[in-house]
Image (cartoon, helix red, strand yellow):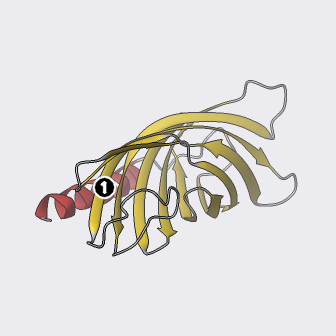
Amino acid sequence: MTKTKALLIALLVGFFFSAQTANAQSTTGYSNALGLRAIGTTGLTYKHFNGRGNALEAILGFGHNSFSATLLTEKYSSPFDTDIVNLYYGFGGHVIFQSDSNLGVDRERFDDVDDEFGVGADFILGLELYVPDTPLAISLDVKPFIEVATSGNAYFGMDPGLGVKLFF
């Protein structure tokens, strides 16, 4: 389990280093956002933008006897003729821990009686809508992932998400 802890620490250190070195406001109109994500991976999100239209997003997910931590790097663009809708896409990784039961997104994963651990690669594609005259953003995305578990099994999932963020 020392490799697990080292990977998690490396992800968190990289996230906080990037968040502190990139403090310019993004092209989206905000620099930071806290929110909730539901449907697939359900949990808390934190997003930080740098001045080049790129963002780092951390997702702390909670499932049926499970906990996951995901870190994504995202690129934002405005392909539509409006300032309130943006397209975003990116990639990252996750770690997931479960205890003596099935996991939330795909209940066929990790169905042994022992505690298990998984690590995976994530991709994301979505749309974000800024609610005019409020500090709110609503997002709809899909976050496909590939994952390998301590059991040796590999998994693939689509992980759709609906998010609501309060930005500042």
Q: Mark 1 = which residue? A: 118
**Place of residue 24 in the rendered image (x, y in percent of width and height, measured from the top left):** 53, 46
* Residue positioned 83% across, 60% down in the render: 134
**Place of residue 29 in the rendered image (x, y in percent of width and height, measured from the top left):** 70, 46
* Residue positioned 33% across, 66% down in the render: 97
The answer to which of 22 and 14 lies nearer the viewer is 14
The answer to which of 142 and 157 lies nearer the viewer is 157
Q: Quadrant of residue 124?
A: top right
Rendered position, 56 above or below 99: above
Mark 1: few/some/many CA within 10 Å (<14, 14-19, 20+): many
**Place of residue 52 in the rendered image (x, y in percent of width and height, measured from the top left):** 53, 33
Amino acid of disc 1: Gly
Which quadrant does the N terminus fall into?
bottom left
In-image side of 47 versus 130 (left or right): left
In-image side of 128 versus 152 (left or right): right
Which quadrant does the C terminus fall into?
bottom right
The answer to which of 43 and 25 lies nearer the viewer is 43
Q: In which quarter of the image is residue 98?
A: bottom left
